[in-house]
Amino acid sequence: MQKGGKIIGTKLKAAHVKAGPNATVKRQRRRDKKRCDSKKVAAVPATEAKEVKVPKAMKVQPKAKAGKPEEPKLSKKELKMAAGFERRHRALYDVGQKVLLVGEGNFSFARALCANLCEGDKKGGENVYATCHDSEADLDKKYSDAAALRKELEDEFNATTLTSVDARRIHNIKEFRGHFQRIIWNFPHMGGNDADVEQSIRDHKALLIDFFKDAEKCLSEDEDAAIHVALKEGEPCKSWKIVQSFRAACPDMDLKEVRPFGFGAWPGYEFRRTAGFDSRHSKKDRAELAKGAKIYVFVRKAAMPGKKRKGD
Ligand SMILES: C[S@@+](CC[C@H](N)C(=O)[O-])C[C@H]1O[C@@H](n2cnc3c(N)ncnc32)[C@H](O)[C@@H]1O
């Protein structure tokens, strides 16, 4: 972990980021203020290990040529379903939960999550640790908005942000051990091109296995403690065989369910590539996400009726 993340007692404090918030961030902040004051969304009961099919029209729409995203043409039924998916995604997180985000890009998901966790006097980020793999210098080179978003997370939402955190070694941070109810990695990827397909598949499987092993050690004892990983549909992610990889890494845990990634639930969140932001790639990224994305929810077998632990 880079020196930005100095350990102070049981709380980790990130380096003070000097850049001021840009106009987009300010606009988003105003919108979130309103959201914070509005009613919280009721939790939706989880469906056991069920995968939900996302109708084509409800997936993220590619950008229109004129610049603005095309409005998806949804029927009433689809609109209702889309709202349900967003609600179910938000319902995975609750005020007061200790949350660790690893592999953040520009920290826009962390920001959207904290905005959603605001309630009354609670600033939303008090129990949220948002981390990225990049060093602070690399992060700022790769994503021009990251500094402002981190500053907002720290100052406005009271969250902690850390750079240079390797998802494969999170349990090396003493304060992280046995601490979190939610450990989230959205769209893990090592970067680089996947020219050697077989090697890349092996590398990503190994990355996930190392992450899962370490993440398990950082989960709290709470019954609903869970590891969440979001993946795009299709290749190359399909070949990573996430569920098999998880079972190999954590025999005492298992897949509880797979939910659609409700992009609309997280205003301001923008997917970022490991290599950094490049507007030339955004269209392709949006098109890939348009094929659908899912969140895999893994919990301890003890929290899943009917599942036996190894050796039982
Ligand atoms: C495709 S990007 C997704 C970024 C972000 N989560 C999002 O949704 O926009 C993959 C992220 O995984 C991160 N990553 C790769 N290897 C990592 C590791 N060993 N530990 C933590 N993060 C890692 C990259 O730095 C990058 O930020």
Image (spheres, rainbow, N blue to C red):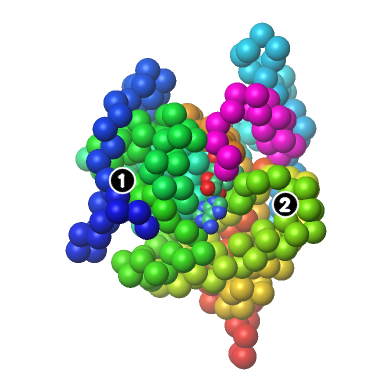
Q: In which quarter of the image is the C terminus?
A: bottom right
Q: Where's residue 26, x and y in %?
A: 34, 21
Camera-side residue of 46 and 147: 147
Mark 1 residue's CB less than 8 Å from ligand 1: no
User: For the point 74% across and 28% down, which residue is it?
Assistant: 57
User: For the point 35% across and 54% down, which residue is it?
Assistant: 2
Three-letter amino acid code of the residue under disc 1: Ala
Regarding residue 72, the answer to whether it shows in the image is: yes
Residue picked out by circle 2:
237
Callout 1 secondary element: loop
Going by the picture, which residue comes out furthest to the bottom? 311
Going by the picture, which residue comes out furthest to the left? 9
Quick check: is 65 in the magenta stretch? no
Assess whether mark 1 and mark 2 are in contact (beta carbons under 8 angstroms): no
For this view, does 1 lie left or right of residue 304? left
Callout 2 secondary element: helix
Q: Where's residue 68, x and y in %?
A: 61, 14
Q: Where's residue 136, x and y in %?
A: 38, 44
Please report the bounds of the magenta region as a residue range: 274-292
Residue picked out by circle 1:
159
Check disc 2: other Cα within 10 Å, few if <14, some if 14-19, many if 20+. Answer: some
Camera-side residue of 166 and 208: 166
